[in-house]
Image (cartoon, rainbow, N blue to C red):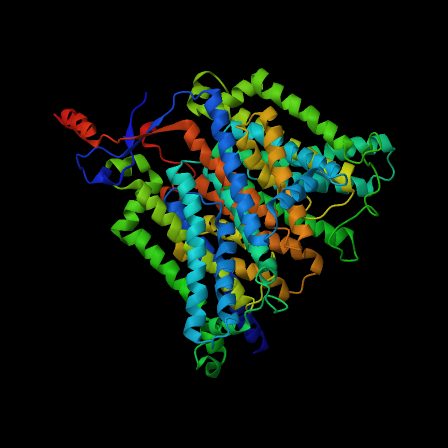
Amino acid sequence: MAIIEQIVELIVRAIMQGTPLLFGSTGEILTEKSGNLNLGIPGIMYIGAISGVIGGFFYQNSGAKIITVLAIIIPLLSSLLGSLIASLIYGFLTITLRANQNVTGLALTTFGVGIGNFFGGSLIKITNSDTPYLALSKISAAYRTTLPFANKLGLFGQLFFSYGFMVYLAVIIALIVSFVLKRTRVGLQLRSVGESPATADAAGVNVNRYKYFATCIGGMIAGLGGLYYILDYSKGIWANDAFGDRGWLAIAIVIFAIWRPNVSILGSYLFGGLYILFNYVSVSMNLLPLMQMLPYVVTIIVLVIVSMRKKRENQPPASLGTNYFREER
Amino acid sequence: MNKAISISKKEHTHSKAAPFITITKRDASSLKWNIAVRVIAIIAALALSAIITVLITGENPIELFSTVIDGAFGQFRIWGTAQAVAMLLGIALALTPAFKMKFWNTGGEGQVLIGALASALVMMYAQPLPHWLACILVVVAGVAAGAVWGIIPAVFKAYWKTNETLFTLMMNYVAIQLIKFFLKVADKSGSSTVGPSLLLYGRLPVLFGQQYMFNIIVVTALTVMMYIYLKRSKHGYEIAVVGESENTAKYIGINVKKVIIRTMALSGALCGLIGVLLVGATSYSIDPNLAGGNGFTAIMVSWLAKFNPIIMIFTTLLIVVLSRGAENVSMTLGLNKSFSDILTGIILFFIIGCEFFINYKIHFNIKAKSGKEAEDSGNN
């Protein structure tokens, strides 16, 4: 029985670790399907996190009574707004101004991580607030509200109902994106933009509009991963660089999931599990870094196998990383 | 050549009105225009940075400016600035041949770190060797490790077209975890760095009593050599052709696979060399943050210089001076040091964006009527 309890606990924690990765990878898949390799996603996730924190910070410190619904909506909206602005910077530079995607993405990551750590570390000083450190305990409580009957269902309840709403939101968004990409006209046209923008353009698809929408919506979804990490997983406490390299791990999962958001659900939980597996298996602490290396090695192996097998439906979008110049086709 | 295209909103509604904005590609933009656009972009970026800084800190702009200058060129910071320039420039130079070949090596960070790790291993265990041999071994081990880290993704790219951006990106984190593993094994105290007390042998020479002089001389030589290699050698020519068009390269008898692997071996080896300098000539210590993100910043530095090693000196200076200046501002005001990352980001956005105005020409069709007539006659 103890073993089962441990396994359930491991799965629960893997899901909680995997949720930011799921938001990030779903957003990146959507973006990449339009041919935009957004390496700014790690930065956008920081911006999404800090925007939500700033929104929540002002609400919590406004002295108003904390209403659960507002405590959820205000950080959520400010997070989405922050991620949207960050995605628009990337979109404007790469789509309208046709700048190099790798360089723009990396610059955005530098910028976004800087924004996150700067405001996370200096918000209290800038606003002359009298709180000792950045902790949104009341806001976080709203985010971590679980269904009332979760505790009464034993292990079953723990496994399925013990999470805040954003864990379910991540799964739902991943399934919706998966459905849209595979089964709808919009999804088909988006994929055509990512595969061959010139063909899509000739067929009357507005390439730039699709690229903009995919990049912005993808960025907003990814930003939610940062928000979840701070307000739910970290219980509302901001610590600089605590989010770590999860953004890059999310990009790794995109490859692992061979550009399918529904596969990315499993991939995210699996990678999330690898992150914390060392708590449950008795290996020497020395081997810990080698275990944390596993997700990246697995990703490389998947990347290599996919490129060797050359199965058409498993390939990255054909135009990934390149911009579309109509006059150069 | 100047085939006009439209980006107006109406382009897909088959409206007959002429688009308000048309964009054409410039055939070759004059040097004057090139420089003017960049200077304007940098001034605009600096102005925006200044406004943001003043808004956030509420300080006097002139005082802030002197803090920035002091942070980069002040008496106690000038050598640190020189060292930072040397290291960033070195990595940017190392990445450049790969970029010229359109091989997006985002793995500079990992190649530097793995080179540093190999050197550190030698420095730890080279006790029985004479000093000069240990020194050589430190360099050789670091360079070789970097080369291996570059060759692995190159082989897969050459033979199976495996996406190199993602592959090299992942290799960074493999290298970081290997260093963390090394720290755990090498230093039983559980410290987060392995420092000078353990890395004792084969330390590279300190020249003219200046800790950073060795690095500065090596990178200066590297700059000149890279310029000659890219502009004047057969290898440089082959790299340029492969970068422009693989088909052309094949047609004129270049072995594309060989060029890809050889160039990435060079790129990785030079990154490894910077790792050697960081451990063997600078700090005699190693930790996962040794490269400090320079592997990524260098990508932007190299690209901003249009892969020209000489111009790269200036783009490196711009980034380093700004970030060290901003670091000083945040230190003086007790703000978080990540402030410099925000300003770096803003500068980069502006320079990245201004490329558009160098490569393309924008026409505003004020006389919409005449445009309409032209299109009508085109339809007939």
Whether residue A192 sits left or right of residue A106 in the image: it is left
Quarter of the figure with the C terminus of chain A: top left
* Quadrant the N terminus of chain A occupies: bottom right
Q: Is residue A243 visible?
A: no
Name the residue nearer the viewer: B43 or A27: B43
**Number of marks in the image?**
0
Residue at the far bottom in the pictured view: A152
Residue toward you, A237 or A296: A237
**Which quadrant of the structure image shows residue B10?**
top left
Q: Position of residue A31 (x, y in %)?
A: 40, 48
Q: Residue at x 36, y 46 (%)?
A: A212
Q: Give how far across and how far down residue B164 sits, in percent.
A: 51, 37
- The reply to whether residue A24 is visible in this rendering is yes
Q: Is residue A113 above or below residue A101?
A: below
Residue B362 placement (x, y as % from top left): 34, 30
Depth order, front residue of A277/A165: A165
Q: Residue drawn 17% across and 34% down?
A: B16
Q: Residue at x 52, y 30 (%)?
A: B39
Percent x, y for residue A160? 45, 73
Quarter of the image holding residue B207?
top right
Residue A72 shown left or right of residue B294 in the figure: left
In the image, is residue B210 above or below residue A120? above
Front-most of B192 and B256? B192
User: Relative to residue B220, is residue A5 depicted above or below?
Assistant: below
> Taking B215 as reference, is A225 above or below it?
below
Q: Quadrant of residue A196?
A: top left
